[in-house]
Amino acid sequence: GCELTASTKSYTFQVDEEDDSDHILALSAVCLTDGAKDECNVVEVIGRNHKSQEIAVPVANLKLSCQPLLSLDNFKLQPPVTFRLAAGSGPVHLAGWHRIVHREDASFEEDDDLSEEE
């Protein structure tokens, strides 16, 4: 998780580009935490679309008096991704999980196929 505030308005989650694994980042919940004011707090996700162009999408608009918490049901993202407090002063806590899927070694798969044929 991470926390966005008036002094820390963004957080970037990235992985090592040389890593040969697939990474999935899932956002579970966004909530206001202790010290939040009754103002609109807009959280947006900044990533890249299929044309590798940067795109920002609002995912939460929280207000202490009417919606202090939003469940995002494991909204899946592909790193690198930046979370930004586009409006409000927070603090806003983001919670989620990161899954690493290791790719199988291609040479191992080829050897395995040959063994089955023999």
Image (cartoon, grey):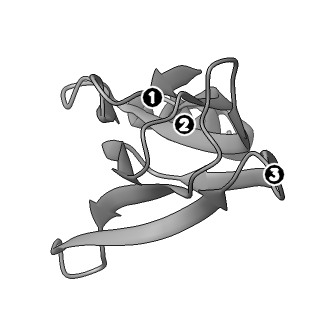
Give the percent coordinates (x, y) of residue 30. 69, 42
Q: Residue at x 30, y 35 (%)?
A: 9
Give the percent coordinates (x, y) of residue 16. 24, 23
Which mark is first along the chain, 3 or 2? 3
Q: Residue 64 sits in which quadrant?
A: top right
Residue assigned mark 1: 105
Residue assigned mark 3: 65
Left or right for 64, reference 85: right
Identify the mark at residue 13; answer none if there is no mark.
Answer: none
Q: CA distance from mark 2 to mark 1?
A: 7 Å
Q: Local crowd at mark 3 within 10 Å, few (<14), some, or many (≥20)?
A: few
User: Quick check: can you spot residue 45?
Assistant: yes
Most extreme residue toward the bottom, as rendered?
A: 51
Choose between 102 and 28: the one closer to the eye. 28
The answer to whether marks 3 and 1 mark residues whose Cβ atoms lie closer than 8 Å is no
Q: Residue at x 65, y 46 (%)?
A: 38
The answer to whether marks 2 and 3 mark residues whose Cβ atoms lie closer than 8 Å is no
Residue assigned mark 2: 109
Query: Label 1 sits on what residue type?
Result: Asp
Query: Label 3 sits on what residue type?
Result: Ser
- Secondary structure type for disc 2: helix
Choose between 72 and 52: the one closer to the eye. 72
Query: Label 2 sits on what residue type?
Result: Glu
Q: Residue at x 35, y 46 (%)?
A: 81
